[in-house]
Amino acid sequence: MRHLEQELTALRQDVIDMWRLVISQVGKSGEAILSFDKDLAMQVSMREKKVDAYELKIDNFCENIIALHQPVAIDLRFVLAVLKINANLERIGDFANSIARLLITHPSISLDADLITQANLREMVEEVKKMLVHGLEAFENEKTSIAASIFSEDSVVDELNDRAAHVFAKYIEANPDRAYECLHLISVFRKLERLGDHCSNIAEEIFFYLDAKILKHSPKI
Amino acid sequence: MLTVEAKNVDFYYSDFHALKNISLEVEKNKVVAFIGPSGCGKSTFLRILNRMNDLIDGTRMTGSVLIEGEDIYAPNVRVDELRKKVGMVFQKPNPFPKTIFENIAYGLRVNGIKDNSFIEQRVEESLKSAALWDEVKDKLKKSAFALSGGQQQRLCIARALAISPKVVLMDEPASALDPISTAKIEELIYELKKDYTIIIVTHNMQQASRVSDKTAYFYLGELIEYDDTTKIFTNPQKESTQNYITGRFG
């Protein structure tokens, strides 16, 4: 294998490793909230530094490849896409951490389990995790057909978020004394919704890398 | 406006079919780079554009090449007249064993120009165009061989420009030069396209991407892909082009 290919293969592996870590972070932070598990939340928080370290390593790797190898065509698109996927994964890691930190910074908060069920938090977490997993599958197997499914999954996440907003509004009306806890849950949903947007951004980058198509700011296929 | 129009060009070295049905157009004041592995036909095609291959025994060409609308292979075309229109710069600097001044003046003199003040003016203009004037203006009477390799190559470019060609062909013009001289030649190509149409053969793909507006990729005597340089180096349409420019070739 020639030198550049070795570098690109190593870069790809770092991205895959970071991706798997981020999927695990999102899954654990969701599970922590769903089961009020502070230990699990602490674990997510501790591993956030690892996500950040991957981000710096991958950025540096891309910079070196561009400076030393001057990649072109699909190799260049791969490195450019990785730079952006890296930034999106790091933001997703941040959201996972900030969801988990709710349990750490507010240890006495009591979230209404019925409200969590009614708002479909578990479905929301699962849907976002599915988007992340599909992104990784599309990247690893170089398949835009898998990346395309992420756009429709993002619509499902948006829909779940909208429906949850109505549930929360009704809940606050009926239980004004619990508005504070409810606001925290709303922020969890908002973070998960943003996380879905980052997964969509990643899917766009996979299309750019594999098909040289620019899907940003345009209707998705 | 088209400066070069090649239509269905086939070329043979005896039985060897070196170029296969090449059609390619070059617009005025553009830089076009020919790339491809050794033996792909890019230099052969470059030499077709000023009939350099006519000198090689056993060669045969079919198809047509128009320079500014004129068929350069028409029977009435004089090759010396053609070469006033189409200048050439080679891989290795090849100045004449004469002074710097006479290297530039030579082409004008053999074309019958005797007016010394005009010749002096053209020498200065050509050396300025080749970004060499400031370095040699005080030593015009010195031998061209006293110049560095990079300066000699710019002298050869100045010599090609002196007779005011329309097209300048460059066959690996910087491959024998150090990085600083190479950068100067590349800057020069960028400057010269204001006044000339330039076609460059290069093995250095970064050079092709830096200097050219369009790139033609040749392989086994065929023109595989010809498109804007930005397109060729970001999203080539043919797998063969991609394999070559990314180094996966072969």
Image (cartoon, grey):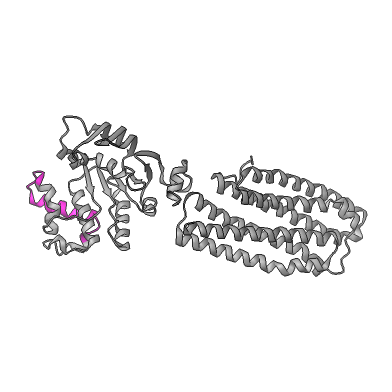
Determine the image quadrant of residue A42.
bottom right
| Image position, residue B204 (x, y; %) | 36, 53
| Image position, residue B149 (x, y; %) | 23, 61
Say if B169 sits above or below A46 in the image: above
User: Which stretch did the figure color magenta?
Assistant: B110-133
Please state, as top left, top right, bottom left or bottom right, where the N terminus of chain B lies in the image.
Answer: top left
Residue B235 vs residue B159: left or right? Answer: right
Foreground of the two, B62 or B114: B62
Say if B141 sits above or below B113 in the image: below
| Image position, residue A41 (x, y; %) | 79, 66
Q: Main secondary structure of the magenta part?
A: helix
Q: Is residue B115 magenta?
A: yes
Residue shown at 31% from the left, 40% from the top: B28
Residue A158 vs residue B219: left or right? Answer: right
Camera sees residue B237: yes
Foreground of the two, B126 or B157: B157
